[in-house]
Amino acid sequence: MYKQKTTNQDPKQQEEAETNGPAGTQVATFGQGCFWCAEAIFESLKGVISVTSGYSGGQVPNPTYEQVCTGQTGHAEVVQIVFDPKVITYEELLEVFWLTHDPTTPNRQGNDIGPQYRSIILYHNEDQKRLAEKAKAELEKVGAWDQPIVTEIVPFEVFYPAEEYHQNYFARNPDKAYCQAVIRPKMEKFRKVFKSKLKDGQ
């Protein structure tokens, strides 16, 4: 089950929704720096039904993008992924998560600096927790990175969808400077490594 709240609503009108998504699907929530990058990556995978950019892991209810960017809300920029486990497993999503960002830099991804850009896995059940901790331990054991992994593995509590202009950002703004300088090179590298897992046309 996951809980989702809508951003920028009157708290009195805001209702908490609980759902597993469409029948037979599961939900994963990851933070790995700017959610524009993560959204573009996970949307490209076979078996991923939807990806929503948003905020999670903090203490301020119903945050705005501007509030999260101050680094004072406790929230991370995250993506919430609805996927078909018959097509792509949570373990495969974890593999993509680990290999498409640097999990060794505290509160930073490249030039994006602040706690909102921290590496974080928000697990929705004990099985996801077990798989995330197992993968982290295995990567540490083989020394996949020179520095220690700082990724947080914490229970999911609530997800606040980001403002509409953040959704499908790369697809809608391919010529923006950030998309050209940061997202496009990352996507090209990702497509080469995970070619067999991409949706048709990706």
Image: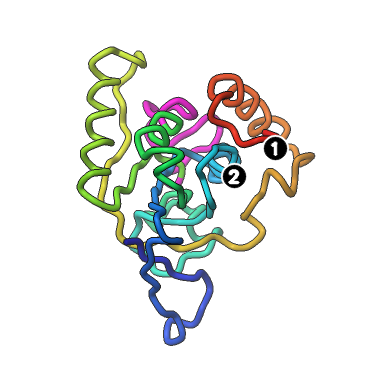
Q: In which quarter of the image is the C terminus?
A: top right
Residue type at numbered disc 1:
Cys
Q: How crowded is mark 1: few (under 14 residues within 10 Å), some or many (20 or more)?
A: some
Colour mapping: rainbow
Q: Find out whether the residues at labels 1 and 2 contact each other: C-beta distance under 8 Å.
A: yes
Badge 2 marks a residue whose secondary structure is: helix
Which residue is located at x 42 percent, y 87 percent?
A: 12
Q: In this view, does 62 lie above or below 134?
A: below
Label annotation for residue 179: 1
Q: Would residue 159 be counted in the magenta stretch?
A: no
In the image: residue 132, left or right of residue 39: left
Q: Position of residue 30 (x, y in %)?
A: 41, 44
Q: In which quarter of the image is the N terminus?
A: bottom left
Badge 1 marks a residue whose secondary structure is: helix
Label annotation for residue 36: 2
Q: Distance between the residues labelled 1 and 2?
A: 9 Å
Q: Would residue 109 be counted in the magenta stretch?
A: yes
**Image quadrant in which you'd find residue 23:** bottom left
**Comes first in the chain, label 1 or label 2:** 2
Q: Where is residue 9 in the image (x, y as percent from the top left)?
A: 51, 78
Q: Nearer the viewer, residue 60 or 17?
A: 17
Q: Nearer the viewer, residue 133 or 66?
A: 133
In the image: residue 167, left or right of residue 88: right
**Image quadrant in which you'd find residue 44:** top right
Q: Nearer the viewer, residue 44 or 56?
A: 44
**Magenta residues, start to end:** 98-116
Residue type at numbered disc 2:
Trp
Which residue is located at x 28 percent, y 28 percent?
A: 135
In this view, which residue lies farthest toward the right? 175
**Image quadrant in which you'd find residue 188:** top right
Q: Where is residue 181 in the image (x, y as percent from the top left)?
A: 69, 30
Which residue is located at x 31 percent, y 31 percent?
A: 150
